[in-house]
């Protein structure tokens, strides 16, 4: 690769499309939402695509806390922001699917296929313990605990309820039923 | 290049002692059963060479009690580095080593860490000392945004074959904290290997440190220039001159004004009527007021503009900070979970068979799929460019803030001046109706004093401008030097890489020959090193295979050091190869490979059990331990 290609590659870099970025966020979600066996599996992988920005960005995290289940009255700017999160999330689902397949291939997670959805859980918990407990992730862990509430049951809630509570209820137009 | 050889070793405390001076060139074997002190023997050597041995520490979870509970104990070795003899003495539990140079008959005590009394006193550590004796220059590696120095104990990780490290990992992790991101990092491991298989590039490191010095020098001049800049800013704020070329003009004008005012004052004193002068003064003041108010409005607009810029910069800075944090985590993840491997399909993890100019799917619409996969080095480069961006953002924020403060100061000054002028007009008009000239007189005197002060400030300003030009010229010349050195460093870097690559090919050949010879050509044919210099063997092997896989790696380094001029100090410590259920026959066969080093210009210290010992190597045994005669001997009270 010559120097121009290297520069181009650096310019093209987008963390949203970075495999390792998604990997560490997914693993942190599974660990701290305690999805570590089949009974506690994370329901419907598609929610991950929205949860990754929610736990990696402080502003989006705050928006989630303030507006999930229409806790506060929404304004135009926030709605626009939510709409952007929705559209980007939908675009990223295929990418997340690839990553999950890679992770399963590496025996890090287990996927459970059901009739119309795919659930997952973390299966190498002990081996990854040191990695996931590293203080480098303290911001993410804090943001996960912000959204972790018994009332919401983020890991267990169905995809359509999740979409409804975060987007539809706040007036964001969505494509799926 | 440098060579290390041990001549004798001694341990002594209030209760125990040990001494051995049977060390020779080539192979040195210590025989013993489990628990007789074979490993302790190697720990003593490592400790004397400045390494960390957790079992010797008071708060260790598994202390070697005879040593930890002994008092006033130390370990001492006579070390030969390139034909010079040194006696190294380290007290147990202390982080410094006393060295006696037998040739120069000099004593020196050096710290193992970069602080404390001994470091302050000598300015170097033990590691710096031994690197110097071995002819290895101080080496720095860049990881993320930090610079680290590679120390001697880091290089020991491929010189000391310990029992604690999982053999699969090859490079020793003895006494290394698992949470130490830097020591466990791939970049560190790669650097250790690269340093050991290369030779000393004096010109490269000279240029490197020269460049570093130039950069420091430049920073110093830039700081100086900034200080002058601030001074000039303050002076300009006081005087109200915004551009350099207006300075001389203003100086001239002030001098003229001074003469004019002085003559007016004389006129007031001599003339009986001053009505005209009062009117003149008021119209002057009026003109000034109009000017001041328009400037005030302009400044207000300027402040708003700057505020907008400032907000934008703050957002950019926040985003960059977040990106850097994410990249650090990405890098950490990639080092912990190494999923994307070159040569493997990123999706199915099977081996890739890509023909040239083809995509991963086989299509000839050539698309470099490498573009979507980032290596650690590329992540680091992305991070570096972000850090650079962050620096720029910080600078521009600082600049905006300074600029804003200057404008606010000027704004306040104008307000004050407007207020002052209002008062003056009031006073003059009051004085005029009363037909008293003292108010006008005071006003003029006040102005004379003010202008006189201004003139002296202008002269200082002129001088500072000259200084500024000079220092800028100096910075420019340093920058040219930096550029030249950078280019030279790039060239040398390339040359260094070429040497490493040549030696790497040689290493691969030696290592491959060892394994093929041990297992037979038909079992193993394809052996290569991955990007982290870890071996890839084409076929599945049983668990016990990890033993030959690791030991031959160390032996290959040793062998390479005998053939080529490299940094590896021709010194190897092997603490018991028996592990992972390897059978005795295989162990005996492995031992055969040590025979060729007999009498060579190198030193191997090998510990092992009686079971796997082969008689041909009897003459190499330098110590035999058993349950009744353990390593550390009790002193007779």
Image (cartoon, coloured by chain):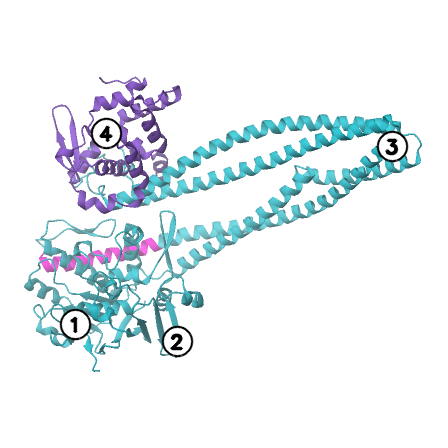
The residue located at (33%, 31%) in the rendering is: A61
The residues tagged by marks 2 and 3 sit, at their Cα atoms, a distance apart of: 89 Å
Residue at the disc numbered 3: B437
**Label 4 belongs to which residue?**
A154
Letter of the chain that mark 3 sits on in the rendering:
B
The residue range painted magenta reads: B496-520
Q: Position of residue B265 (x, y in %)?
A: 86, 37
- Could you give the CA–CA distance between mark 4 and mark 3, rounded to whole angstroms? 86 Å
Whether residues under marks 1 and 3 lie with C-beta atoms below 8 angstroms apart, the answer is no
Q: Earlier in the sequence, mark 2 or mark 3?
A: 2
Horizontal arrangement in the rendering, residue B37 relative to residue B482 (left or right): left
Q: Is residue A70 above or below residue A23?
A: above
Category of crowding for the residue at label 1, using alpha-carbon neighbours closer than 10 angstroms: few (below 14), some (14–19), many (at least 20):
many
CA gap between label 2 and label 4 equals 68 Å
Badge nearest the viewer, 4 or 1: 4
Dot 1 and dot 3 within a common chain: yes
Circle on res. B29:
1
Residue B421: percent from left, percent from top: 74, 30
Marks 1 and 2, the one that precedes in the sequence: 1
**Distance between the alpha carbons at the discs numbered 1 and 2:** 32 Å
């Amino acid at each position: 690769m010559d120097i121009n290609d290297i520069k181009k590659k650096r310019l093209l870099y987008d963390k949203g499309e970075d495999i390792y970025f998604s990997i560490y966020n997914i693993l942190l979600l599974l660990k701290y939402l305690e999805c570590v066996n089949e009974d506690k599996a994370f329901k419907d992988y598609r929610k991950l695509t929205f949860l990754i920005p929610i736990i990696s960005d402080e502003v989006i995290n705050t928006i989630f806390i303030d507006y999930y289940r229409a806790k506060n009255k929404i304004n135009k700017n926030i709605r626009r922001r939510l709409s952007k999160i929705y559209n980007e999330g939908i675009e990223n689902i295929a990418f997340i699917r690839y990553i999950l397949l890679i992770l399963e291939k590496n025996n890090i997670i287990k996927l459970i296929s059901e009739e119309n959805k795919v659930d997952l859980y973390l299966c190498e918990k002990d081996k990854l313990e040191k990695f996931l407990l590293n203080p480098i992730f303290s911001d993410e862990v804090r943001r996960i605990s912000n959204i972790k509430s018994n009332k919401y049951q983020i890991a267990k809630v169905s995809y359509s309820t999740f979409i409804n509570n975060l987007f539809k209820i706040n007036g964001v137009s969505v494509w799926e039923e | 290049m440098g060579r290390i050889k041990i001549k004798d070793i001694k341990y002594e405390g209030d209760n125990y002692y040990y001494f051995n001076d049977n060390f020779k060139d080539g192979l040195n074997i210590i025989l013993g059963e489990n628990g007789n002190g074979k490993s302790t023997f190697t720990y003593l050597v490592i400790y004397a060479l400045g390494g960390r041995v957790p079992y010797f520490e008071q708060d260790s979870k598994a202390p070697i009690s005879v040593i930890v509970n002994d008092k006033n104990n130390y370990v001492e070795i006579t070390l030969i580095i390139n034909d010079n003899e040194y006696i190294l003495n380290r007290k147990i539990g202390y982080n410094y080593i006393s060295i006696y140079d037998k040739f120069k008959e000099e004593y020196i005590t050096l710290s193992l860490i970069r602080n404390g009394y001994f470091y302050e006193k000598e300015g170097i550590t033990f590691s710096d000392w031994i690197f110097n004796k071995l002819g290895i220059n101080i080496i720095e590696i860049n990881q993320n945004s930090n610079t680290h120095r590679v120390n001697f104990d880091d290089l020991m990780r491929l010189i000391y074959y310990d029992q604690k490290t999982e053999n699969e990992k090859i490079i020793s992790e003895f006494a290394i904290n698992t949470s130490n991101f830097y020591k466990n990092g791939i970049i560190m491991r790669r650097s250790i290997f690269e340093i050991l298989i290369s030779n000393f590039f004096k010109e490269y490191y000279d240029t490197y440190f020269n460049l570093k010095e130039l950069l420091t020098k430049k920073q110093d001049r830039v700081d100086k220039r900034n200080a002058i800049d601030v001074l000039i800013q303050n002076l300009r704020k006081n005087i109200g001159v915004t551009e350099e070329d207006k300075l001389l003009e203003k100086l001239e004008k002030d001098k003229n004004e001074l003469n004019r005012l002085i003559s007016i004052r004389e006129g007031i004193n001599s003339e009986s009527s001053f009505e005209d002068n009062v009117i003149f003064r008021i119209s002057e003041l009026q003109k000034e007021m109009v000017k001041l108010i328009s400037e005030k409005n302009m400044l207000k607009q300027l402040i708003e503009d700057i505020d907008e810029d400032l907000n934008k910069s703050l957002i950019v800075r926040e985003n960059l900070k977040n990106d850097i944090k994410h990249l650090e985590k990405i890098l950490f993840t990639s080092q912990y979970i190494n999923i994307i491997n070159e040569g493997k399909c990123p999706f199915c993890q099977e081996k890739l068979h890509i023909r040239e100019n083809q995509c991963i799917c086989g299509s000839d619409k050539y698309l470099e799929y490498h573009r979507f996969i980032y290596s650690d080095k590329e992540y680091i480069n992305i991070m570096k460019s972000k850090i650079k961006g962050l620096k720029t953002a910080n600078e521009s924020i600082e600049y905006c803030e300074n600029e804003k403060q200057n404008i606010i100061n000027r704004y306040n000054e104008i307000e004050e001046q407007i207020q002052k002028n209002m008062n003056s007009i009031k006073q003059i008009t009051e004085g005029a109706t009363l037909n008293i000239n003292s108010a006008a007189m005071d006003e003029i005197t006040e102005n004379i004093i003010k202008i006189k002060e201004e003139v002296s400030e202008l002269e200082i300003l002129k001088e500072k401008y000259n200084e500024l030009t000079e220092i800028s010229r100096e910075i420019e010349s340093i920058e040219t030097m930096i550029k030249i050195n950078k280019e030279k460093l790039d060239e040398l870097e390339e040359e260094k890489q070429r040497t490493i690559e040549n030696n790497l090919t040689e290493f691969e050949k030696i290592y491959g020959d060892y394994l093929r010879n041990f297992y037979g050509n038909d079992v193993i044919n394809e052996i290569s090193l991955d990007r982290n210099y870890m071996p890839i063997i084409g076929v599945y092997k049983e668990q016990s295979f990890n033993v030959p896989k690791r030991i031959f790696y160390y032996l290959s380094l040793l062998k390479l050091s005998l053939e080529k001029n490299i940094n590896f100090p021709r010194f190897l410590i092997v603490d018991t190869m028996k592990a992972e259920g390897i059978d005795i026959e295989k162990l005996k066969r492995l031992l055969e490979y040590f025979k060729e080093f007999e009498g060579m210009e190198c030193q191997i210290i090998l510990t092992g059990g009686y079971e796997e010992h082969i008689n041909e190597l009897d003459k190499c045994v330098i110590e035999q331990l058993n349950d009744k005669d353990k390593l550390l001997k009790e002193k007779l009270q």
